[in-house]
Amino acid sequence: MSGTHGAGPPEGHEGRDDAPGPDADGLDVGDDHAQYTPHRSPFGRPPRAPILARTFPVSQQLDAREYPKRKLRPDLIAGVTVAAMSIPAGMAYASLAGVSPVAGLYALLLPALAYAFLGSSRQLIVGPEGAIAALVATTVAPFAVKQTPEYVNLVAILALLVGAIYVLAHLLRLGFIADYFSRAVLVGYIHGVAFVLIVGQLGKIFGVPIEQERPLAQLREFFGELDQISWVTFGVAAVSIVVLLLFKYGLPKVPGALVVLVGGIVASVVLDLSAHGVRVVGDIPAGLPHLRLPELGWGDVRDLLPGAIGIFLVGFADGVLNGRAFAGRHNQRIDANQELLALGAANAGAGVTQAFPVGASSSRTAVNDQMGGKTQVVGIVVAVVAAIVLVFLTAPVEQLPSACLGAVIVVAAIGLVSAHDWRALRAAGRGQVVIAVITTLVVVLVGVLEALVVAVILSILDVIARSSRPHDAVLGWVPRMGRYADVAVHASARVTPGVVVYRLDDRLFFGNARYFRARAREAIAGAPTPTRWLVFDAQFVNDVDASGAEAVQQLYESLRARDVHFVVARLEDHAQHRFDATGLTELIGPANFHPTVEAAVRACVTVDHLRSGGYEPGSRD
């Protein structure tokens, strides 16, 4: 450790850099030892996988000897089950996005295949998703009437824009941005979206025409039109919700959404529900979608770009978080940059097949995992099943009541609400809850896209707040632990009279320099005895910038004016280099740097003893 100024080499090996000696644990390494090559980084990258495996991760999952025997059957079962969930959910989310329900089936074709071949997660299911569908409607609705050809064209342009942003981020290797989404912001955002989703389905569930787009305006309009409620429609929706909840919490492995879809179609045909005022899905063109580019105008790109960026941020954060959560359960790894490429291709596929932007589905991913899905063959099965429905089964789907689709969305939104998430935030600190609540309120009161801007600002402010007021502590000797520890946590901690040990648990830079100086002085002011020594435990100070160095200098000089001596303990190599370069080592004095807190305190006690002639060391006794 470079902080041990004055410490020479082991006896008998003076001046020999290559001499054997004790290792970090005090063991003799003998003559057989290894060394790193000079002027070369000790950090090396692991061997890269072949380019085929890197570009198409699914190729690594399909071992020709093992796959058919151990993985094919669970993948087929999981694929059919996930498809049974995805078809009604996709149609429901298409309605939410403002396009024909058939677009939800289109979104299960090329997007699912693209992610299956390019995605790095073995469990993640990509396709229509509620929060993204809501963002689509919010983005496009101001520029066209829902379900019109112009609206559909703008939605396709939006999907291509989202795909292009993903691919650009992949080329720039921006996968690291996924690490900077605050969990508090995401929790607040998801719960706000859940409220927006539920309110947005009131018209379908109660058979009331609602024209407003904002959730609070929708609520006002709904309560102003209670006399127009269709009780038959409400009955269909209520039964659907009850059935969905029963399957969700009682038989989670059974695709309740498929039961509701089939039951709704049968009831609609047998009871002629449309004749009783119940709206049904209506015409769905049979067959697979044609591949074509939307009519692109630069004005459309300008109008839709802010929404596309918002969808990218939400979709990528949600996809990586979900992917990492499920990968962690199986000791797997998610490549964030590969996810950018896969999600970009999925959205591009949606854009050329008259679908809408897609993302990761946490609910369908969870079902896939529960059903034992092993590889992305599950996504391929989902696409095949959706294609079969489009070619052969569109006629019965046309009779599906819209209230059933509304029920699917409501139950999916209920599934987004998690008391556990809020308890986890509360355990992490009250500030985390405040950030989540603010994000939720902005989603509900202002809008989903605006909430993204606020969410980013809140995340940045959270980082700034944490950096400007990092954790610190005053330390004392805890006999039962045999080390120095926080006196605020350990009531048995003993302090040496005249010596204050202060620790900062972060780098020292411009954002917390003033805080460091103030807290060091407060530590001295709060000491139980008059202070003659301040021991700065710098174990966790991994870097020091110019402002940090100036703060140390100012603290040193102010303490010297009060006849308080400043010493440093456990300064690591990189920070020591900064101290040397800025002149702090020379200012403080090399003899005042110590390898441990205990050594620093003992040195302080020894000096006091020599000065006074009456103080005996042994403050720990």
Image (spheres, rainbow, N blue to C red):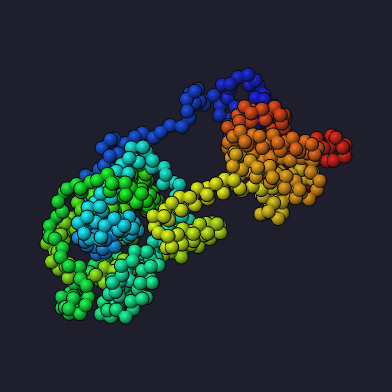
Is residue 226 rendered to the left or right of residue 277?
A: right
Q: Residue at x 53, y 50 (%)?
A: 462
Expressed as whole percent of the image width and height from the top left, the position of residue 521 reads 73, 44
Expressed as whole percent of the image width and height from the top left, the position of residue 578 reads 61, 30
Query: Quarter of the image holding residue 520?
Result: top right
- Report the residue that reaches farthest toward the right: 613
Q: Which residue is drawn at 47% across and 28% down?
A: 41
Is residue 515 rendered to the left or right of residue 466?
A: right
Query: Quarter of the image holding residue 17?
Result: top right
Expressed as whole percent of the image width and height from the top left, the position of residue 459 reads 49, 50
Count of marks placed on residues: 0
Residue 397 visible in this rendered orientation of the protein: yes
Q: Residue at x 71, y 29 (%)?
A: 587
In the rendered image of this protein, does residue 230 appear above or below residue 216?
below
In the rendered image of this protein, does residue 364 appear above or below residue 346?
below
In the rendered image of this protein, does residue 461 appear above or below residue 600?
below
Using the image as rendered, state which of residue 472 and residue 489 is in the foreground: 472
Using the image as rendered, state which of residue 544 and residue 607 is in the foreground: 544
Using the image as rendered, state which of residue 107 and residue 597 is in the foreground: 107
Q: Residue at x 46, y 65 (%)?
A: 419
Residue 80 visible in this rendered orientation of the protein: no
